[in-house]
Amino acid sequence: MKMKSPRDFWAGLMFSAFGLFFLAAGRNYRMGTATNMGPAYFPTVLGGLMAVLGGIMFLQSFVVRGEKVPAMHFRPLFFIILSLLLFGYLLKPIGLVFALAFLLVASAFAGHESKLKEVLILSVGLILFSVLVFVKGLRLPFPLWPKFLG
């Protein structure tokens, strides 16, 4: 059989690999039932669905003609990973508000169409939303500000 869609081939392989990984990882935990879910329930069900969908995409890549895999751009990947690492590292020392600001500004460098004014407006809105939902609504114990600001 000849591969007709490299994009579907690699996507199907990736989905299947992740799905099988989660299926294997969930074996060490209690499964439970649909009404009383154990810790293995969600990863097992999600992993199984991912593996099945990946298998369908993989097999479809030999039947349906599709696009080639586009070139990999490492700049967006670098800035997204950097912004997530910065957020995780800075959350406790400088608080949720400033850590989210760093996350959003650093991740804006991943794109080529970002404008500073738009990023700042989006940052204010997302910070307000995050504080209202996670700190006020769900009462998660995130520090809002650095300790020296009180």
Image (cartoon, rainbow, N blue to C red):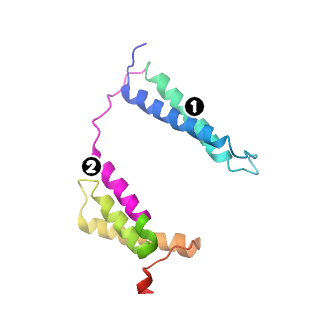
Front position in the image: 147 or 97 = 147
Is the C terminus in the top left, top right, bottom left or bottom right quadrant? bottom left
Image coordinates of residue 72 in percent, x first then y, are: 29, 39
Nearer to us in this view, 118 or 147? 147
**The residue under label 1 is which amino acid type?**
Val
* Tag 2–tag 1 contact (CB < 8 Å): no
In the rendered structure, the answer to whether residue 18 lies left or right of residue 106 reads right
Q: Nearer the viewer, mark 2 or mark 1?
A: 2
Image height of 106 relative to 61, above or below:
below
Question: Would residue 86 appear left or right of 52 to someone viewing this image?
Answer: left
Among the 4 quarters of the image, the one containing residue 126 = bottom left
Is 63 magenta? The answer is no
On screen, 55 above or below 135?
A: above
Q: Residue 17: x, y in percent? A: 51, 34
Q: Name the residue carrying label 1.
A: 52
Q: Quadrant of the N terminus?
A: top left
- 3D distance between C-alphas at marks 2 and 1: 32 Å
Q: What residue lies at 30% left-to-right and 70% top-to-bottom?
A: 120
Q: Is 78 within the magenta?
A: yes
Q: Which element type, helix, strand or loop, lies under badge 2?
A: helix
* Amino acid type, label 2: Arg
Tell me which residue sits at (72%, 50%) in the image: 37
Q: Quadrant of residue 125?
A: bottom left
Q: Which residue is mark 2?
A: 75
Residue 148 x %, y %:
41, 85
Classify 55 as above or below 63.
below
Task: Name which residue lies at 43% across and 74% down.
Answer: 93
- Which stretch appears magenta? 64-88
